């Protein structure tokens, strides 16, 4: 470490070939030791508003908890991205936090404008369960053009038609 003008700086370190190999090997072991639990029975649904016309601007996005357990400390990041008329477009990243989501329920997340259906819409969800201390996360991606009536299904607990990813 070098000190310069009252700041402490770390000097760059060169790692020899065998030391680098050992570090990579240790990282693979550490990565293997981290549990990778699969998220099941949780989904994201996009549903047209009740009584909406074809020209309706807003639909609603829901988190669907099909588990028999509470979801705790739920964090949802949403964003849209893609090309419009040959130009790259990105929406703002929105973040939503819920202390808990009840079992076997639907919780509204946010409205979504129909003009965003021409983009890829991504929802990244992180949560924990009461019976363990593991942080679960999963990314749900509605690809461009996938939010259409031809992909409708009945959304559990809402009993409405919409597009859902589990």
Image (cartoon, rainbow, N blue to C red):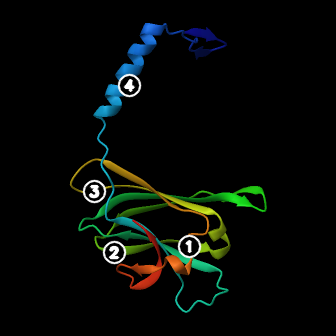
Q: Nearer the viewer, residue 122 or 83?
A: 83
Q: Earlier in the sequence, mark 2 or mark 1?
A: 2
- Tag on residue 27? 4
* Residue name at image x 61 percent, y 79 percent: 58
Label 3 crowd (10 A; few <14 / some 14-19 / many >=20): some
Residue position for label 2: 105
Percent coordinates x, y for residue 94 in the rendering: 57, 60
Side (left or right) of 1 relative to 56: left
Note whether 133 is above or below 85 in the view shown: above
Which residue is the site of mark 1? 147
Q: Secondary structure at mark 1?
A: loop
Tell me whether the residue at label 3 lies in contact with that at label 2, contact meaning CB atoms closer than 8 angstroms: no
- Quadrant where the N terminus sits is top right
Q: Position of residue 157 (x, y in %)?
A: 35, 80
Q: Residue 85 appears at what percent x and percent y?
A: 78, 62
Q: Residue furthest front?
A: 150
Q: Nearer the viewer, mark 4 or mark 2?
A: 4
Q: Nearer the viewer, mark 1 or mark 4?
A: 1
Q: Earlier in the sequence, mark 1 or mark 4?
A: 4
Local SS, label 2: strand
Helix, strand or loop under label 3: loop
């Amino acid at each position: 470490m070098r000190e310069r003008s009252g700041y402490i700086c770390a000097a760059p370190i060169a790692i020899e070939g065998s030391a680098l190999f050992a570090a990579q090997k240790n990282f693979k072991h550490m990565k293997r030791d981290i549990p990778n639990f699969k998220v099941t029975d949780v989904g994201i649904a996009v549903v047209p508003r009740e009584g909406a016309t074809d020209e309706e601007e807003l639909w609603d996005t829901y988190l669907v908890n099909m588990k028999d357990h509470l979801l705790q400390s739920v964090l949802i990041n949403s964003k849209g991205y893609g090309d419009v008329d040959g130009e790259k477009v990105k929406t703002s990243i929105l973040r939503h936090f819920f202390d808990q989501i009840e079992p076997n329920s639907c919780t509204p997340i946010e409205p979504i404008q129909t003009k965003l259906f021409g983009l890829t819409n991504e929802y990244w969800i992180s949560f924990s369960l009461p019976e363990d201390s593991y942080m679960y996360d999963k990314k749900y991606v509605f690809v461009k053009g996938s939010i259409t009536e031809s992909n409708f299904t009945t959304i559990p607990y809402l009993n409405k038609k919409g597009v859902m990813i589990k």
